[in-house]
């Protein structure tokens, strides 16, 4: 007697996950070879835990990318800059989600959302195509605007208006300007 299991559906996520795992395991293999050549001892459990943490981090970035509309590559750079300024990944993700919502609201004609961006001299629409600009491009423009502003209550209030509850914590990150976070 033979049992056969057939799985159907969209396999694109699984294929991407396997490809990511293959790349990460290749990197892990070179790290392990280096460690063993230096006389280090790495346990199998340690390798498994390390691999799992890599996969979890990649999945988290992928999910954040879907929620914010910012590419995984750009999110990786943003997370690094955020961490250097004391902003945790979760705060960054929530703030970027709030920003995306404000961008869509402004593009959809919300007077209050339009006023927030206008006050900072940032456009959410491409002047040529009249399409919504990528969230990453808007973020970099906002960072330049915040970096140029004096610290104080007005700056904190604007950050909360645009980036949500964690907006005030985003100020050290934003104060780096485009050059520091881009």
Image (cartoon, rainbow, N blue to C red):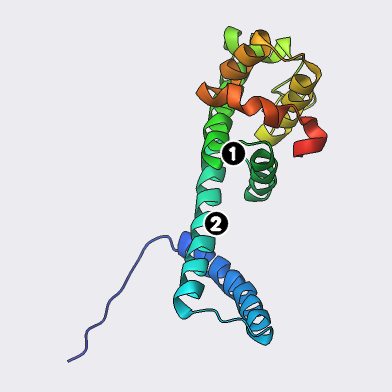
Q: Which of marks 2 and 1 is in front?
A: 2
Alpha carbon distance from label 2 to label 1: 16 Å
Tag 2 secondary structure? helix
Element at badge 1? loop
- The earlier-in-sequence mark between 2 and 1 is 2
**Residue, x 51% and y 68% (percent of image)?**
51
Q: In this view, does 151 lie to the left or right of 110?
A: right
- Place of residue 121 in the rendered image (x, y in percent of width and height, measured from the top left): 77, 15
Location of residue 95 (image quadrant): top right
Q: In this view, does 11 lie above or below 130?
A: below
Instruction: Determine which residue is flagged by label 2.
Output: 58
Total residue callouts: 2
Decide if residue 73 is in sight here: yes
* Residue 9: quarter of image: bottom left
- Judged left or right of residue 171, residue 51 is left
In percent of width and height, residue 109 lies at: 59, 13
Q: In this view, does 123 lie above or below 23?
A: above
**Neighbour tally class for label 1: few under 14, some 14-19, many 20 plus, Cα within 10 Å:** some
Q: On the rendered image, what quadrant is the C terminus found in?
A: top right
What residue is pinned by disc 1?
A: 69
Taking the view exactly as shown, the residue that stands out farthest to the bottom is 1
Where's residue 135, x and y in %?
66, 33
User: Is residue 88 or residue 120 the one in the foreground?
Assistant: 88
Nearest the eye: 90 or 17: 90
Image coordinates of residue 179 in percent, x first then y, are 82, 36
Quadrant containing the N terminus is: bottom left
Report the residue at 54% width, 26% height from top.
166
């Amino acid at each position: 007697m033979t049992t056969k299991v057939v799985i159907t559906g969209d396999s694109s996520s699984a294929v991407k996950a396997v490809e990511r795992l293959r790349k990460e395991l290749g990197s892990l293999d070179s790290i392990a070879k280096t460690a063993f050549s230096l006389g280090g001892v790495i346990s199998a459990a340690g390798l498994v835990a390390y691999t799992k943490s890599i996969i979890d981090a990649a999945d988290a970035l992928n999910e954040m990318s879907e929620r914010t509309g910012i590419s995984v590559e750009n999110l990786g750079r943003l997370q690094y800059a955020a961490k250097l300024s004391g902003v945790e990944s979760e705060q960054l993700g929530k703030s970027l989600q709030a920003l995306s919502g404000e961008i869509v609201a402004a593009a959809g004609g919300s007077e209050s959302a339009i006023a927030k961006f206008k006050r900072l001299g940032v456009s959410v629409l491409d002047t040529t195509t009249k399409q919504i600009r990528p969230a990453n491009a808007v973020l970099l423009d906002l960072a330049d605007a915040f970096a140029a502003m004096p610290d104080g209550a007005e700056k904190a209030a604007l950050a909360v208006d645009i980036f949500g509850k964690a907006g005030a914590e985003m100020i050290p990150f934003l104060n780096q300007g485009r050059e520091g976070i881009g």
